[in-house]
Image (cartoon, grey):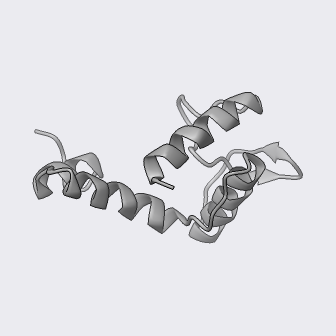
């Protein structure tokens, strides 16, 4: 499945579960303990566990990882003709002047 399609399905699935992903101090893959959404600092292992948890809950998990989601977006933009400079700006590597 295309990572953009998977992300759209995830956001829609989360909304159906009553989890709002947009807004200040919110995470795209919020940490969850005992079935409740929590706030706090995240480690990479926790990010991958949370990604798997939420995609599984939305019944769309297919082995995705946070690294794959991040790199997939960059590769997709590059293949669609975006310049390296533009991709780096979108990824937050370069500041927009």
**Between residues 40 and 36, which one lies in front from this camera angle?**
36
Q: Residue furthest right?
A: 34
Question: Residue visible at 56% across and 44% down?
Answer: 28
Give the image location of residue 57, x and y in percent.
77, 49
Q: Is residue 32 left or right of residue 76?
A: right
* Residue 41 picture quarter: bottom right
| Occupied quadrant, residue 53 | bottom right
> In the image, is 46 to the left or to the right of 78?
right
Q: Nearer the viewer, residue 24 or 50?
A: 50
Spot the residue most to the bottom. 45
Whole-percent x, y for residue 47 in the image: 61, 61
Q: Which residue is located at x 64 percent, y 57 percent?
A: 51
Q: Is residue 61 visible?
A: yes
* 15 sits to left or right of 67: right
The residue drawn where x is 73% and y is 29% is: 16
For image coordinates 67% across by 58% down, the residue present is 61
Tell me where residue 11 sits by quadrant: top right
Residue 21: percent from the left, percent from the top?
A: 60, 34
Residue farthest to the front, as pictured: 1
Numbered circles on residues, count? 0
Q: Is residue 23 above or below residue 39?
A: above
Residue 52, compared with residue 8, is above or below; it is: below
Question: Relative to 34, is 29 on the left or the right?
Answer: left
Q: Quadrant of the C terminus?
A: top left
Q: Position of residue 87 (x, y in %)?
A: 21, 52
Q: Nearer the viewer, residue 87 or 4?
A: 4
Tell me: residue 56, above or below residue 90.
Answer: below
Asked if one can make out residue 94 in the rendered structure from this viewpoint, the answer is no
């Amino acid at each position: 499945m295309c990572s953009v399609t998977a992300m759209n399905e995830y956001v829609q699935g989360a909304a159906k579960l009553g989890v709002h992903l947009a807004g200040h101090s919110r995470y795209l893959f919020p940490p969850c303990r005992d079935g409740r959404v929590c706030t706090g600092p995240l480690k990479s292992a926790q990010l991958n566990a949370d990604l798997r948890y939420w995609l599984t809950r939305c019944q769309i998990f297919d082995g995705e990882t946070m690294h794959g989601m991040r790199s997939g977006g960059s590769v997709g933009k590059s293949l669609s003709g975006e310049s390296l400079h533009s991709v780096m700006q979108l990824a937050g590597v370069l500041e927009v002047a």
